[in-house]
């Protein structure tokens, strides 16, 4: 919402400076977006008197001018044919910036003559395209005076953002009212008394709309003007419209725009001679169309309110008039519409047709219900003043929608809600200046809401009005105290685990990524997603149209991008959501990670190698361990990983039926589809699936250290090639649960010396004597137990 | 006796001049071995009369000890020299680089959430969360945003297919639905923050279709805008690490709060350098207000008995301001160069005890 300072002062009697006003506005909730003060920009451009102008000695087309600026005499070389002794022009000293180009003016020597400034043309000043000569100012212009003032540019333009509730500030008057309430002046009276009417309007309303609550068009007011002269608007009107970014068109149209900006009351002016019969208001027929004032054609549906005459529809209610019946230069008779339309209907129509207009903006935020009447009078006064002619009586259909609301304000509520004690007389004064009718005093104050404040719907709004105007700066600052002496944990177990997972993986050298919750349907399908219920109706692009079924695909596609930038060896993770369905339960918290390329850059110790699934399995186990998963009881299910993993090089971590995670090589076909080079290994750990240990308090079980030295025995077994190593390890562990305390697999071998279809697995078993040192015989017995248990459980036999 | 002394002197001289351990061992055997010269002399003592034997024995023992300790000393010297030589041969170029290891890093979003959690937790808040896919009831209606409300149009909402009852599903456009979910199931007092993902259909230099917000909600019988002010001013000063940071509250509008306030922090652009702190300019960083009575009663909380405030701010925005990260979009690009540059040391968990400003 733009307005100029002088416009504001039409409504506000004030001594306040621009600075004071602009500092107050945001504190009232009217955020200042920009202040454009052309008198500031043009401060260096002043009236200069050409004391003498003579022919340049070395150039035919140039003149040397001696310019009196009021404070000094400056020599300027000028090429304008009208630069001559005795005229007054716009002088710009060296250092000034030319408004049209932004270039800084520099001192110079032109063909041997010094030039220390410039006399400007209209084009250079950004006023018009005129560049045939320099500007000649009236001879009574005061030497040294600012040009901005003379040209009427000394009216600063203020642009403020209006929050959706403040429809009343979509007119300059509303802003003035707020400032008056805040003590920055006095709201001037507005003359909305009826104009003199001389005849009955030949055009009437024919409103044919279904009964609805709220009504679609509760009130329409029209007035016929005859014998008007629709020329171009007076200078002041054009300047104001231009200042706020509106293009002057013709006086009648400009008046409707002016009233809209001035008091927030949109109007529409029909050329009455282009209207046939009465004017109807009805719902459109499907497929009906019109050409709007913006020159574009729009097609209606049955929900849109349209206005027209015997020749057809030519106006979209509350949004934009039509080309056919609009006013033009030749208009002599005019019909002026001021109506109230349902804001919701106006908004939905505008949205469907994607028409953005100043009128729609105001209609959909809600107009003053009484404005059709006083707006008509205000506009009529301007029409008669500027265009002459005669005004008809009003033609009215419907009645003011019921806008009267009274709320009780409990005085104590102000302090209870905001902590500020506003003295009662100030409360009453503020409410009254804002237009509330106030009665009663003490604890209960009855407040009748003015018609322009439809946003006030209860006591809390009244409190806000008072404190907003009183000043949010008056609200005390009271620090929040923690109610608990010893703070309770702020995080749930799941939240703690999220954090632990992140920092555990980062400690393992991985970089944390945060990626979008959505991705392409193609990638979603590759990772088991893509269900209809998880596809966005309105994605910003096809690349981001489905909710992610896994955290891996976004990490994998990052490999390609990083590789293009020269980083091939990646170790990245994300702890975030995946979505298996659209319900709250379908959102799961996952720790996922990938490693790609080599374990590091090539190095002189030759220690780096391509990453493999055991790297990522270690990462996964580390996370599981960090999150207190019972890793000793985990089963690795070699066929448990889903289809985006390599079927022979992946596994699932299970705890009974519960899957805690997956790990392995990413399926080469997935990588090929995603156009990423492998190998890439990855894991997913489902944080919510990890059981929370039943709390037995913080105490640990008692540590019993064995006093005796443990013994190590190595065994190698020939087993079937398909045998899972874990089976053999578990067999060894189970051979004597008391004495076998650790089993470490240290070799896997197949090939020469090993029968076809078999492999050798070697383990080191730690045997821990308990009460006394084991004799050779006892050790022999345990070894035998281990061998027979492994033979029994795995079908393997001891390697010679 | 004199010849014994001479013999000893000779031996000690030869020990000192011995250059190898073998040579030294040879000397030891020659002198102190079973058939060594000194051993021989010791043996011959038996033939002397007791008086002389005692005197000669003492002398001989002294000689024997002196020779033995000379040998030991020489041995240590030679071993040390040998070790020194060995060590000299073993030396390596210690300026060679170590085996490659990558240093992990924590994303600025995580670090920022951990920081603000530490601060709010100090004020007694707990952390709540909720689903990203919401019904439009929780995202809009329950927050006093009816379907045709202009505020609802201004948010570019991502829609998903409706549920089985035909209710539209949306990606939450703010973390505020968690306010509703919490109030529905909790009897006040309530004191929560809600950091999390939010989504809006907007993509340009300053908007990302996914971003993070943190919501705050306090409901009890007495909390008012003064507490809101204290809570947020304390937060801003702690978070940005500026004790005298100016914080300004301006009236504003949000459908779910009344009165509503936007909060600005002081900043300066003096000398072309942006800095947060006392200055001539303001920067808007969050929205807040007293929870709207309609919102409370919609959640089954009596607005005549309970009241409180809510606030919300963009996490990327405060992270960018605090850590001087110039651009929003790379937050989600997973560019390893960005993650390493703007990331944080893995174990540097922000705490009140350790401070939250790095």
Image (cartoon, grey):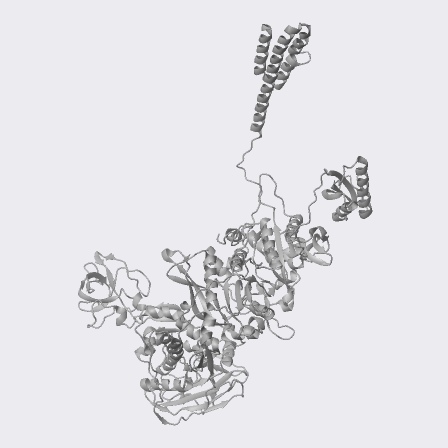
- Above or below A277: residue A405: above
**Quadrant of the image for the N terminus of chain A?**
bottom left
Q: Is residue B275 left or right of residue B180?
A: left
List x then y, in percent, for residue B11. Answer: 59, 12
> Could you tell me how many numbered marks the image carries?
0
Q: Is residue A562 above or below residue A125?
A: above
Relative vertical location of residue B14 with respect to residue A800 in this rendering, above or below? above
Q: Nearer the viewer, residue A484 or A624?
A: A484
Based on the displayed image, in which of its 4 quarters is residue B245 positioned? Answer: bottom left
Question: Is A305 drawn above or below residue B127 in the view shown?
Answer: below
Nearer the observer, A335 or A619: A619
In the image, B169 versus A530, the foreground residue is B169
Left or right of A448? Residue B98 is right
> Quick one: which residue is furthest to the front in this view?
B51
Residue A474 occupies which quadrant of the picture? bottom left
Residue A766 lies, in percent from the top left, at 73, 41
> A232 and A440: which one is in front?
A440
Residue A396 in sight from this viewpoint:
yes
Residue A136's spot in the image, x, y percent?
23, 70
In the image, residue A604 lies at what x, y percent? 58, 39
Outermost residue toward the bottom?
Answer: A199
Residue B259 in view here: no
Where does the C terminus of chain A fall, quadrant-wise?
top right
């Amino acid at each position: 919402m733009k307005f100029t300072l002088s416009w504001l002062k039409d409504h506000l009697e004030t001594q306040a400076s621009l600075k004071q006003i602009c500092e107050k506005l945001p504190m009232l909730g009217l955020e200042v977006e920009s202040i454009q003060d052309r008198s500031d920009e043009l401060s260096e451009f002043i009236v200069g008197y050409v004391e003498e102008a003579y022919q340049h000695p070395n150039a035919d087309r140039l003149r040397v001018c001696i310019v009196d600026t009021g404070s000094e005499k400056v020599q300027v070389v000028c090429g304008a044919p009208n630069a001559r002794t005795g005229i007054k022009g716009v002088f710009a000293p060296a250092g000034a910036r030319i408004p049209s180009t932004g270039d800084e003016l520099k001192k110079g020597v032109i063909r041997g003559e010094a030039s220390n400034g410039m006399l400007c043309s209209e084009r250079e000043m950004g006023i018009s395209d005129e560049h045939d000569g320099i500007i000649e100012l009236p001879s009574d212009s005061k030497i040294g005076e600012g040009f901005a003032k003379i040209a009427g540019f000394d009216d600063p333009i203020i642009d403020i953002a209006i929050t959706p509730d403040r429809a009343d500030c979509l007119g300059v008057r509303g802003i003035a009212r707020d400032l008056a309430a805040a003590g920055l002046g006095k709201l001037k009276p507005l003359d909305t008394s009826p104009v003199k009417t001389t005849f009955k309007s030949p055009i009437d309303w024919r409103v044919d709309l279904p009964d609805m609550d709220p009504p679609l068009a509760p009130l329409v007011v029209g007035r016929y003007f005859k014998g008007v002269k629709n020329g171009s608007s007076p200078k002041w009107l054009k300047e104001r419209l231009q200042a706020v970014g509106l293009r002057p068109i013709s006086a009648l149209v400009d008046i409707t725009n002016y009233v809209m900006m001035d008091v927030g009351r949109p109007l529409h002016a029909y050329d009455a001679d282009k209207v046939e019969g009465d004017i109807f208001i009805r719902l459109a027929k499907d497929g009906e169309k019109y050409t709007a004032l913006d020159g574009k054609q729009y097609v209606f549906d049955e929900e849109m309110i349209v206005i027209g005459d015997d020749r057809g529809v030519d106006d979209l209610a509350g949004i934009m008039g039509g080309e056919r019946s609009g006013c033009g230069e030749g208009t002599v008779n005019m019909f002026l519409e001021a109506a109230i339309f349902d804001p919701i209907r106006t908004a939905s129509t505008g949205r469907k047709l994607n028409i953005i207009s100043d009128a729609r903006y105001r209609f959909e935020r809600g107009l003053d219900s009484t404005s059709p009447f006083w707006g008509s009078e205000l506009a009529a006064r301007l029409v008669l003043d500027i265009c002459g002619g005669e005004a008809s009586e009003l033609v009215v259909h419907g009645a003011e929608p019921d806008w009267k609301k009274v709320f009780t304000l409990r005085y104590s509520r102000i302090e209870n809600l905001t902590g500020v004690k506003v003295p009662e007389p100030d409360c009453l004064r503020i409410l009254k200046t804002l237009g509330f009718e106030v009665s009663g005093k003490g604890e209960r104050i009855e407040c009748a809401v003015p018609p322009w404040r439809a946003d006030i719907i209860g006591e809390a709004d009244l409190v806000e009005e008072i404190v907003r105007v009183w000043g949010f700066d008056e609200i005390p600052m009271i620090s929040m105290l923690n109610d608990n002496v010893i703070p309770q944990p702020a995080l749930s177990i799941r939240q703690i685990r999220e954090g632990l997972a992140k920092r555990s993986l980062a400690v393992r050298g991985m970089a944390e990524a945060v990626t979008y919750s959505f991705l392409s349907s193609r990638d979603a399908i590759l990772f088991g997603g893509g269900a209809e219920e998880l596809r966005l109706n309105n994605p910003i692009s096809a690349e981001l149209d489905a909710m992610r079924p896994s955290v891996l695909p976004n990490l994998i596609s990052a490999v390609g991008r990083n590789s293009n930038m020269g980083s091939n060896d990646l170790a990245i993770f994300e702890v975030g959501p995946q979505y298996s369905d659209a319900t709250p339960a379908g959102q799961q918290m996952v720790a996922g990670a990938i490693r790609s390329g080599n374990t590091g850059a090539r190095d002189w110790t030759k220690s780096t190698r391509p990453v493999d699934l055991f790297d990522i399995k270690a990462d996964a186990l580390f996370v599981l361990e960090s999150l207190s998963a019972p890793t000793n009881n985990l089963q690795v299910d070699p066929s448990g990983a889903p289809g985006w993993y390599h079927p022979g090089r992946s596994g699932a971590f299970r705890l009974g039926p519960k899957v805690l995670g997956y790990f392995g090589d990413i399926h080469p076909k997935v990588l090929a589809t995603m156009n990423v080079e492998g190998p890439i290994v990855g894991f997913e750990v489902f944080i919510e699936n990890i059981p929370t240990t039943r709390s037995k308090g913080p105490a640990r079980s008692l540590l019993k250290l064995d006093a005796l030295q443990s013994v190590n025995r190595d065994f190698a077994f020939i087993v079937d090639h398909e045998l899972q190593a874990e089976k053999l390890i578990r067999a060894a562990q189970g051979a004597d649960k008391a004495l076998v305390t650790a089993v470490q697999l240290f070799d896997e071998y197949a090939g020469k010396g090993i029968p076809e279809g078999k492999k050798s697995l070697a383990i080191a078993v730690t045997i821990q004597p308990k009460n006394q040192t084991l004799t050779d015989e006892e050790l022999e017995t345990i070894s035998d137990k281990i061998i027979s248990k492994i033979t029994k459980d795995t079908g393997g036999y001891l390697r010679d | 006796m004199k010849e014994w002394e001479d013999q000893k002197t000779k031996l000690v001289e030869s020990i000192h001049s011995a250059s190898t351990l073998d040579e030294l061992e040879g000397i030891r055997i020659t002198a102190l071995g079973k058939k060594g010269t000194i051993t021989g002399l010791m043996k011959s003592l038996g033939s002397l009369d007791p008086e002389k034997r005692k005197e000669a024995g003492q002398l001989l023992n002294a000689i024997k000890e002196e020779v033995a300790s000379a040998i030991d000393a020489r041995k240590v010297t030679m071993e040390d020299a040998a070790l020194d030589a060995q060590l000299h041969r073993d030396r390596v170029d210690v300026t060679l680089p170590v085996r490659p290891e990558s240093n992990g890093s924590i994303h600025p979003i995580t670090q920022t959430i951990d920081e603000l959690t530490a601060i709010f937790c100090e004020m007694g808040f707990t952390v709540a969360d909720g689903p990203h896919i919401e019904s439009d009831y929780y995202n809009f209606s329950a927050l006093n945003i009816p379907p045709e409300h202009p505020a609802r149009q201004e948010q570019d909402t991502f829609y998903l297919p409706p549920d089985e009852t035909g209710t539209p599903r949306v990606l939450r456009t703010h973390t505020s639905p968690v306010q509703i979910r919490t109030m529905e199931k909790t009897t006040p007092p309530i004191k929560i923050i809600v950091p999390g993902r939010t989504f809006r259909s907007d993509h340009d230099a300053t908007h990302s279709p996914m971003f993070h917000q943190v919501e705050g909600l306090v409901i009890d019988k007495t909390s008012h805008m003064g507490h809101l002010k204290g809570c947020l001013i304390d937060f801003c000063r702690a978070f940005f690490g500026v004790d005298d940071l100016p914080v300004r509250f301006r009236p504003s509008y949000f459908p779910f709060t009344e009165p509503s306030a936007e909060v600005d922090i002081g900043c300066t652009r003096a000398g072309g350098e942006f800095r947060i702190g006392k200055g001539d300019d303001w920067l808007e960083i969050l929205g807040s207000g007293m929870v709207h009575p309609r919102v409370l009663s919609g959640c089954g909380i009596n607005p005549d008995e309970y009241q409180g405030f809510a606030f919300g701010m963009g996490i990327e925005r405060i992270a960018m301001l605090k850590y001087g990260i110039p651009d929003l979009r790379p937050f989600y690009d997973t560019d390893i160069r960005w993650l390493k540059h703007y990331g944080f040391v893995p174990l540097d968990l922000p705490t009140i005890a350790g401070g939250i400003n790095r």
